[in-house]
Image (cartoon, grey):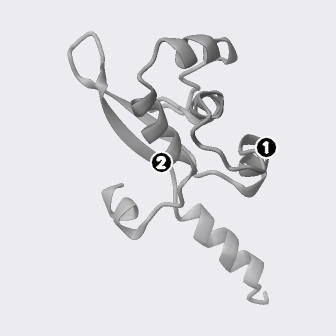
Amino acid sequence: MADKVIDRAKAHFESFGVQKCSVPEWLDVNGKPTTVYWKPITLAERNSLIPASGNLNDLTLLATIVIQKSLDKEGKKLFAEEDILPLKHKVDSEVLGKLAQLMIATPTPEDQKKK
């Protein structure tokens, strides 16, 4: 079988695996931080989520990213589409923004070591 560049490129992306972030501001019933998981963003997702302006200060965009990318440990969605209004109006925008930015960033070698 021939070694194709596309196969190397796909293997690189697959090596990112599932990412995660502890959110200490979102405590569970036991007082422990919520852990949010997500798969790295694909070009197709980036194209559909991020408008041409690339304005990451738009809270609607931040909430949309978090809704679409957030998973629990088992890979189930943490948020539903109807959570957009509470995320926009009743959630700390700094926390939401940090989480959304992590979700659209390419994992670094340090991120890879944390897995």
Instruction: Please tell me how crowded label 1 is: few (under 14), some (14-19), or many (20+) other residues with Cα within 10 Å.
Output: few
- Residue type for callout 1: Ser
Label annotation for residue 48: 1
Counting from the top left corner in percent of width and height, residue 88 is at 56, 18
SS at circle 2: helix
Asked if 53 appears above or below 21 in the picture, the reply is below
Counting from the top left corner in percent of width and height, residue 16 is at 52, 60
The residue sitting at 59% across, 71% down in the picture is: 12
What residue is shown with label 2?
Answer: 102
> Would residue 107 be found to the left or right of residue 51 on screen?
left
In this rendering, the count of numbered labels is 2
Instruction: Please tell me how crowded label 2 is: few (under 14), some (14-19), or many (20+) other residues with Cα within 10 Å.
Output: some
Question: Which is more toward the observer, 101 or 73?
Answer: 101
- Residue type for callout 2: Leu
In the orientation shown, which residue stands out farthest toward the left? 31
Label annotation for residue 84: none
The residue sitting at 53% across, 65% down in the picture is: 15
Asked if 26 appears above or below 66 in the picture, the reply is above
Between the residue at mark 2 and the residue at mark 1, the CA separation in whole angstroms equals 17 Å
Counting from the top left corner in percent of width and height, residue 20 is at 41, 43
Please tell me in which quadrant of the rendered image residue 55 appears. top right
Question: Considering only order in the chain, which callout, 1 or 2, is on the residue closer to the N terminus?
Answer: 1
Question: Which is more toward the observer, 54 or 5?
Answer: 54
The residue sitting at 64% across, 27% down in the picture is: 60
Asked if 21 appears above or below 70 in the picture, the reply is below
Q: Quadrant of the N terminus?
A: bottom right
